[in-house]
Image (cartoon, rainbow, N blue to C red):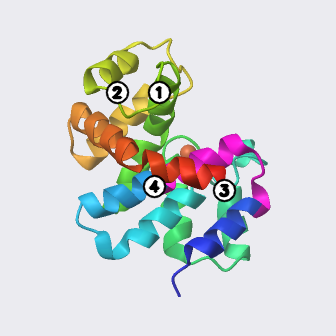
Amino acid sequence: MAMTRQQAWDLLTQYNKETFHLRHAITVEHVMGWYADQLGYGADKEFWSVVGLLHDLDFEQWPEEHCKKSQELMRQAGVEESIVRATASHGWGICVDIKPEHEMEKALFASDELTGLIGAAALMRPSKSVADMELKSLKKKFKDKKFAAGCSREVISDGAALLGWELDKLLDMTLKAMQGEEDAIEEAVRSI
Ligand SMILES: [Fe+2]
């Protein structure tokens, strides 16, 4: 049986307490939901969103076992294998050897680090918002390797290649996703 958002949230908050991590989970949840609609997978939107919500399940408590411990935690909780696999595949080439195959897995791999970069860029703006951010300024932040150095440009570029997209398309789409979802993300973060 498919996992509901509420079940995923309960599992997430069992192992994640810090707002920083919960905000990231919620952000990727919404970006993945946006991508599901955008890429023609609207019928599977909740599945895409749940994968986004749970993708870093183990990171707050077990950063050294990232994408490995999460598989154990999910199986223990009876989470379906497609979610276990999809979430773990975002650590491909970094902490696990599970390659993103499904378009959903590729979208997760490509957008995860990028949402961090876009979020950091938003905080630099007077508005503290993505609403008035232009692709041009995001491209500049992407090229400035010293800015949000923890967000791997290599992973983002590899993600675009997995999707078969130019880097600019990935930046543009993910920026649009975060703009479209910003209000919903902020509302969800407020109700943590
Ligand atoms: Fe993440």
Mark 2 or 4 closer to N-term? 4
Residue 47 drawn in magenta: no
Q: Is residue 100 visible?
A: no
Q: CA distance from mark 3 to mark 2?
A: 25 Å
Q: Is label 4's Cβ within 8 Å of ligand 1? A: no
The local secondary structure at tag 4 comes to: helix
Q: CA distance from mark 2 to mark 4?
A: 18 Å
Q: For mark 1, does the 10 Å Cα neighbourhood hold few (<14), some (14 to 19), or many (20 or more) residues?
A: some
Residue type indicated by callout 3: Ser
Residue type indicated by callout 2: Met
The local secondary structure at tag 1 comes to: helix
Quadrant showing the C terminus: bottom right
* Left or right of residue 176, residue 128 in this image: right
Image disc number at residue 133? 2
Q: CA distance from mark 1 to mark 3?
A: 21 Å
Segment colored magenta? 14-29
Which residue position holds label 4?
Answer: 30
Residue 44 position within the rendered picture, expressed as x and y whole percent measured from the top left: 36, 74
The local secondary structure at tag 3 comes to: loop
Q: For mark 3, does the 10 Å Cα neighbourhood hold few (<14), some (14 to 19), or many (20 or more) residues?
A: few
Residue type indicated by callout 1: Ala
Which residue position holds label 1?
Answer: 122
User: Looking at the magenta stretch, what is its main secondary structure?
Assistant: helix
Which residue position holds label 3?
Answer: 191
Mark 3 or 4 closer to N-term? 4
